[in-house]
Structure formats: structure tokens, C-alpha cells
Amino acid sequence: MITLKEALKLNKDELKKFKDELKTKIESKPELNAYIDVNNVGDGVPIAIKDNIQVKDWAVTSGSNILQGYISPYNATVINKMTNAGLSPFGRTNMDEFAMGSTTESSFYGKTQNPHNAQCVPGGSSGGSAAAVGAGLAIAALGSDTGGSIRQPAAFCGIVGMKPTYGRVSRFGLGAYASSLDQIGPMTQNVEDAAILYDIISGFDEKDSTSAQKDDKVSDKLDSTKKMRIAVLPKHLENASDVVKAAYAQAIDALKEAGHEIVEHSLMDAKFDISAYYITATAEAATNLARYDGIRYGNRITGTNLEDTFIQSRSNGFGDEVKRRILLGNFVLSSGYYEAYYVKAQKTRHMIKNQYEKIFSDVDLILSPIAPSTAPKVGELENPMDMYLSDLYSISVNLAGLPAISLPINKTKDGMPVGLQLIANAYDEQTLFDGALSLEKQVKYTK
Ligand code: GLN
């Protein structure tokens, strides 16, 4: 598959031919189920779009039954920015319902296969985007990351996935899951493409009240020769599988060979991250999803009266995982429990942010696992608690609002990709991409 950088140089006729061939290729692999539909807009470079990002006149459903029949009345800001830069939305990709999940198994449209092994999940929630790029069925894609949903599926599918600093990329037109954590980001074949797509979609937007007043760009200034001080987290590895530990050791060697300085640091126990995240995320989700009532959007089941219509539409429209989170979110926000859970989670969130600030007063980047293992088998994370615990390496980055990028390091003997992530200080995307480019060059991962 050609890279985004190469595709941006194609002329109109070449692009048209490429897109026709791409469509045929996608249709020849329906079992992958990475795309929900292929629906080109405009004549730019085709980019796959997660099904929670609005493209005017397209269906947008966040992988849910409750939004069947809903059509986007406007473009998300990222889509307008893409179109202005010569890209065009090309197909909606599959995802966990409302981005709640780590495997893409909770989608209304059924599971997506991992392109490296059909018995394995692609990760989630942006599993369709990751599988499309990993299978050579997309040049690049957009995903969203609330607690790892770009970085973890990227790692499971052998591609690059980047979550920007909170506030860098407008959330206008993104289906909200947990508004204080959500960020849209690029999923690409390599680090340079991620930087190019990041530059295109980032920047201040007056339509998003949490948008940062910053417009600095990175891709023209990429420099893999800068020598950095990089923190490693030996204690943090306890819950990682042997293949992840081996990749971590390999990445440390590669970084040293590239001339970077490695220093040891530690993070607080990840059990605090999990608790703070699942309280914060479900509380915000319960609030955000209250708008899906069967009246204003998508699917309606008409009941005997208005209340019955709400109840039936929501009972029928939401899947089990979404219902579980709405219940949990409303519980932690309820008057008797608010102080005990929600307020405590916010205090923990501050502690998590502070620990990162302390580390970044000493180093440029942190090297961390992104998931405890390679892609799990279909059904392996059926127990919700097992699934939540598998997010231990990804979610603190969102709680602290930091930028991070996951990239493939090597493959297991069974051919499954193993990825790791680099984390940078807030708004320091330049250092993040420079370090990632250096690591990518040194490990020479081959598809
Ligand atoms: N797996 C996490 C969750 O279910 C993260 C999902 C995401 O980043 N959207 O909440």
C-alpha cells in the first residue's frame, strides 16, 4: 500500500484509479469487516473514518443500533480540515459501540477480524480503522482515543496510532463518549504519515470550548537525530506478557543504539488508573448518552406514552456493555455515592497528572507498554472486568491529557505484531514524533 506522503503526490486520474482498485480490494475481503460501508466523498486522498466522526450526509452510528437511520447534518471539524488539505473521507470503519471496549466485539455490525490472525480481535475501540490500515485496505484512518482506543488496536494490527494532547484536535462532530478524555487521532502505516495527518487535523477550533489556542505543526520539522533522555518503567512491566517484555528490552537497546539516554522511573500502581478511569469515563458517558432517547436521533420504538418510548428505545437500542456503563456512571454520580466515588476519582486523576509532571521535569519521553499482551483471541475478554483490567497501560495517558504514540516493534513467532508506546509532555508532539521516528528507524519492523 502506498503511504499517505506518496498518495498526496498523485494527480486526479491516478487517485481515481487508485480508489476504484481500493474499493474492489475492500469488497473482496468482506470477512475482515473493517469497513461498515465504503462511501467516497470528493476526489482527494482516501482516508478511512471511524463510525463516530460526522461526515455530512453519511450515516454515523457509533457502532450502535440506537443510531440506525441517523444521517450527519454537518462535517466534524477534522473532516473539514482534511478536505481542505486534499484528503477525502472514504468509508466508515467498525468500532465498539460508542467506543466502549477494547476488542471491537461490541459493535452492532458484528466483530472485525485481526488482519494477522482471523481468530484474534483487532483491538478496540477503533478496531475497524486499525484492521483496515493493517490489512492494506486503507492508506490511513482516523480513530478516537478515550482510554487507548487508537494506540491499542494500532499495536494489535502492526500499525502506528497517535493520541494527541487533549485540546489539540477539535472534538466538534465526534460522538462523545467521555468528553474530558476523548481525542481524535491518526492511524497510519508509519510515523511520518502520522505526523502529516496529525498536522492536518490539529489546531484551534472555536466550535470546541476545550480546544487549545495552539497551531504549531510538526511534520516539516521531523528530526530523528535529536538525542533525548527517555524514561523506562521496569516495575510497570510486571503485568506484561513475555513477548511484551522482550519487545520492551529490544526497544531499550534500539534507543540506546540511536544515542538516547535511558533512565529509570516509576508510576503509581495501575489499579488507581483503572478505578479513576472507569469512574470518570462511565460518569461522563452516562451524561453524554442521555441524549439518545428515541426522539431526537435514530431508532425509535414507540411505546404507550413518552416515558415508555424512552424506555423501549433505550432498552432495545443500546447493547449490554453500554447499558452496564450507563448504570455504573449514574451510580457513581448519584447523591449518596458522588463523594465516595466521583470526587475521589478526580483527586486520583490529579495525582496521576502530577506523577507525570514530575517525570517530565527530568526526561523528554517515556517508553511504556500499550497493552499487556498481543491481540487476544475472540471471546477471551468476555468478562467485562478482564477487559477493563487489560487497559492498564493506556488509560493514565488520557487521564493526564498527554500525547502518546504506539508503534510496532516486532512480531511473535506466530506472526502477531507487538507494539509499544512513547509518551510526551503536554503539547510536546514534536518531541513525541521525533523520538518515535528514531525508534522506528532503529527497530526496522517489517510487515
Ligand atoms: N477500552 C477503554 C474503554 O472501554 C478505552 C476505549 C476508548 O479509548 N474509546 O473505555
Image: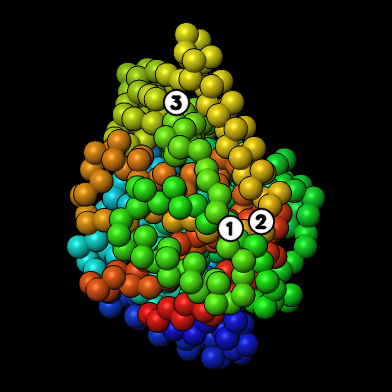
Disc 2: CA contacts within 10 A as few (<14), some (14-19) or many (>=20):
some
Q: Quadrant of residue 410?
A: bottom left
Quarter of the figure with the C terminus: bottom left
Q: CA distance from mark 2 to mark 1?
A: 8 Å
SS at badge 1: strand
Q: Which residue: 67% across, 59% down?
A: 364
The x and y percentages for residue 202 are: 68, 59
The x and y percentages for residue 387 are: 32, 43
Query: Coloured how?
Result: rainbow
Q: Nearer the viewer, mark 3 or mark 2?
A: 2
Residue 159, placed above or below residue 63: below
Residue 67, placed above or below residue 27: above
| Residue indicated by mark 3 | 329
| Residue indicated by mark 2 | 363
Q: Earlier in the sequence, mark 2 or mark 1?
A: 1
Q: Earlier in the sequence, mark 1 or mark 3?
A: 1
SS at badge 2: loop
In the displayed structure image, the side of residue 187 where residue 157 appears, left or right: left
Q: Pointer 2 and pointer 1: residues touching (CB < 8 Å)?
A: yes
What is the number of the mark on residue 263? 1
Residue nearer the viewer, 318 or 101: 101
Q: How many marks?
A: 3
Disc 3: CA contacts within 10 A as few (<14), some (14-19) or many (>=20):
many
Asked if the residue at label 3 sits under 8 Å from ligand 1, the reply is no
Q: CA distance from mark 3 to mark 2?
A: 36 Å
